Image (tube, grey):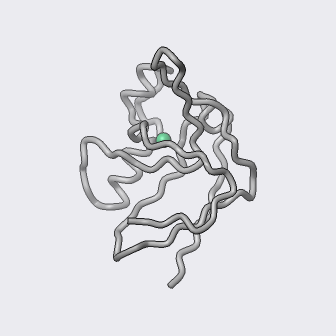
Amino acid sequence: MFKVIYDDVGKHDLLHPCCRPEMYDFFYNNGAGHPNCLDNINNSLNEKRPIITPVNIFMNTKIDTDGNISVEKPLSKAGNRIILKAEHDVRISVAACSASESDCNSKKCTAIQIQITD
Ligand SMILES: [Zn+2]
């Protein structure tokens, strides 16, 4: 679907589904009204998908020798970028994850910049 043309970080996540209210409830007891990627992406696409399996760009996920999965602090730094080339027409949605409770975003959500060109 996409070809990676350039990548400052080189590590991304394909394991985790979108964060959702149930996840915030389970881990942090604060899911009600918490912004989340599932709702943000569904709303932007005007859909109601029960599960979305995103490409989590710059998300630093580790799998240990026992198969345990953990989300670690990002390897990316401000200004890092990835350039993707769509190999055919695509419809995409992008969410800047709202998880400030974990190491996923180093406990601080920040803005992202996206440029789409021909
Ligand atoms: Zn999220």
| Front in this rendered view, residue 69 or 22 | 69
Q: Position of residue 44 (x, y in %)?
A: 37, 60
Q: Nearer the viewer, residue 88 or 95?
A: 88
Q: How many marks?
A: 0
* Quadrant hosting residue 111: bottom right
The residue positioned 53% from the left and 64% from the top of the image is: 4
Q: Is residue 43 above or below residue 114?
A: above
Q: Quadrant of the N terminus?
A: bottom left
Is residue 102 toward the left or the right of residue 106 in the image? left
Horizontal side of 78 relative to 96 (left or right) equals right
Q: Residue at x 67, y 33 (%)?
A: 73
Q: Residue furthest right?
A: 78
Residue displayed at 39% across by 32% down: 21
Work out whether residue 92 or residue 76 is closer to the camera in this orientation and state it: 76
Left/right of residue 22 with respect to residue 71 in the rendered view: left
Name the outermost residue toward the top: 66
Residue 105 position in % (x across, y down): 63, 38
Residue at the location (53% across, 67% down)? 84
- 65 relative to 51, above or below: above
Give the farthest residue toward the front: 65
Q: Is residue 106 above or below residue 113?
A: above
Residue 51 spot, x, y in % from top left: 28, 42
User: In the rendering, at what x and y percent does residue 22 appear?
Assistant: 36, 28
